[in-house]
Image (cartoon, rainbow, N blue to C red):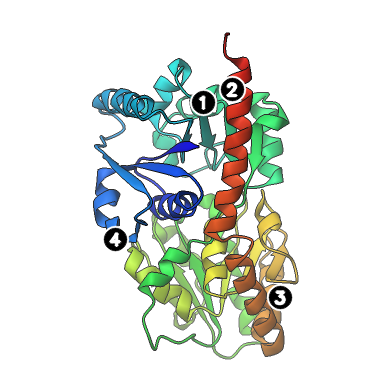
């Protein structure tokens, strides 16, 4: 089967790992934004046929011409299927008119997150075009699948629940000699209201009752951080890196972490947990979206109710105060990352989704 994998500006690491895995089992053509394609060229396996794509700002109508040219190239290659990694506004506008091949799209979030100004740059109805007009969809869990089927009236057999892969590429930037810091609690990623950072910060007082020394490392940017300053009780308990985190620094943050915390109050899924697992770090996360399908409660981390700083603190303390439990969770996290979430296994699951999509699409074509 000849597959076209399309990755515009987002999720470059994810796209490259998936492309590498797919290239070992199929004829894979990766259409990637020219910036990431140039930057990460040495991380793409030789079996991947790379096609850099000129990209434009969302508001630039030239993006429509880029999308038309891209579809023409896919058709000329004779691809059996195209896979859009993430909704892209101008390409979305072309999807209803695709006739030469079936398109499968990965839906990472069914709805825009409240308060996330970056995702809200694209109107929801534009983002929805890829979900409404693709031949089939990929999501990252059963809960997401139920949401997609309900929201768009899509038949379950046209939606495939496939876990995120492990993002182990970040380990390529590991620094030798960097050791884990004792009682280092990491919050990593964009900072928006739905991420629930305030509840981790409110857990500080509960943690301080039982831990003499600990650090909450907050690494990422998003909304104005000054609104979170009021939750800080003791500045010595914090390391705040309120800036964009370059790829080269991600590994160091996870190497130094003792536990990774996702205090989200609303989410579909997360890339942070797979990254943590690939570094062998236990995860404390909340019971939202498909996250409980990824983090196994009591095995490679804990699942707690959202908006409960006391529960967050208890779960964090249970890991930090029990070295045997922490070691066991770390081993299980690593095992999950390099087995269940390996790029080879995830690629195989995608191939099964592609095959079913192509078969169904061909049956629907006029004879």
User: Which element is circle 3 on?
Assistant: helix
Say which of 173 and 82 sits in front.
82
Q: Nearer the viewer, mark 3 or mark 4?
A: 4
Determine the CA span between mark 3 and mark 4. Answer: 43 Å
Q: Which residue is depicted at the point 56% across and 54% down?
A: 270
Q: Is residue 238 left or right of residue 353?
A: left
The residue wearing badge 1 is: 102
Q: Nearer the viewer, mark 3 or mark 2?
A: 2
Label 3: few (<14), some (14–19) or many (≥20) C-alpha neighbours in 10 Å: some
Residue 270 numbered tag: none
Going from N to C along the chain, the mark reached first, 4 or 1, is 4
Residue 42 numbered tag: 4
Q: Which residue is depicted at the point 43% across and 54% down?
A: 20
Determine the CA span between mark 2 and mark 4. Answer: 35 Å
Residue 361 numbered tag: 2
| Rendered view: 84 above or below 191 | above
Image coords of residue 80 (percent x, y):
48, 30
């Amino acid at each position: 089967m000849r597959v076209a994998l399309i990755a515009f500006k987002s999720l470059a690491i994810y796209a490259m790992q998936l492309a590498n895995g797919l290239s070992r089992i199929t004829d894979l053509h990766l259409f990637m934004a020219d910036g990431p394609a140039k930057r990460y060229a040495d991380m793409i396996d030789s079996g991947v046929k790379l096609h850099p794509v000129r990209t434009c700002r969302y508001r630039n109508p030239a993006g429509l011409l880029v999308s038309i040219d891209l579809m023409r190239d896919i058709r000329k290659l004779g691809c059996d299927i195209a896979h859009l990694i993430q909704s892209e506004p101008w390409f979305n506008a072309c999807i209803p008119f695709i006739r030469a091949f079936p398109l499968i799209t990965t839906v990472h979030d069914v709805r825009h997150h409240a308060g996330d100004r970056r995702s809200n740059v694209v109107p929801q109805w534009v983002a929805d075009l890829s979900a409404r007009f693709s031949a089939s969809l990929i999501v990252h869990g059963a809960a997401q699948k139920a949401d997609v089927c309900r929201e768009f009236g899509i038949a379950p057999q046209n939606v495939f629940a496939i876990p995120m892969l492990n993002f182990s590429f970040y380990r390529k930037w590991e620094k030798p000699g960097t050791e884990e810091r004792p009682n280092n609690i990491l919050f990593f990623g964009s900072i928006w209201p739905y991420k629930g950072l305030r509840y981790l910060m409110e857990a500080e007082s509960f943690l301080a009752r039982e831990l003499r020394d600990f650090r909450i490392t907050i690494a990422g940017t998003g909304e104005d951080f000054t609104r979170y300053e009021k939750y800080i009780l003791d500045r010595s308990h914090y390391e705040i890196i309120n800036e964009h985190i370059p790829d080269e620094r991600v590994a160091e943050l996870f190497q130094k972490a003792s536990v990774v915390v996702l205090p989200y109050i609303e989410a579909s899924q997360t890339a942070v947990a797979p990254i943590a697992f690939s570094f062998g770090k236990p995860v404390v996360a909340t019971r939202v979206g498909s996250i409980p399908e990824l983090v196994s409660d009591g095995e490679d981390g804990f699942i707690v109710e959202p908006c409960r700083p006391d529960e967050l603190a208890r779960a964090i303390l249970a890991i930090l105060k029990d070295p045997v439990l922490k070691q066991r969770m770390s081993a299980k996290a690593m095992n999950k990352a390099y087995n269940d979430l390996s790029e080879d296994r995830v690629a195989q699951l995608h191939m099964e989704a592609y095959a079913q999509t192509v078969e169904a699409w061909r049956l629907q074509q006029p004879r």
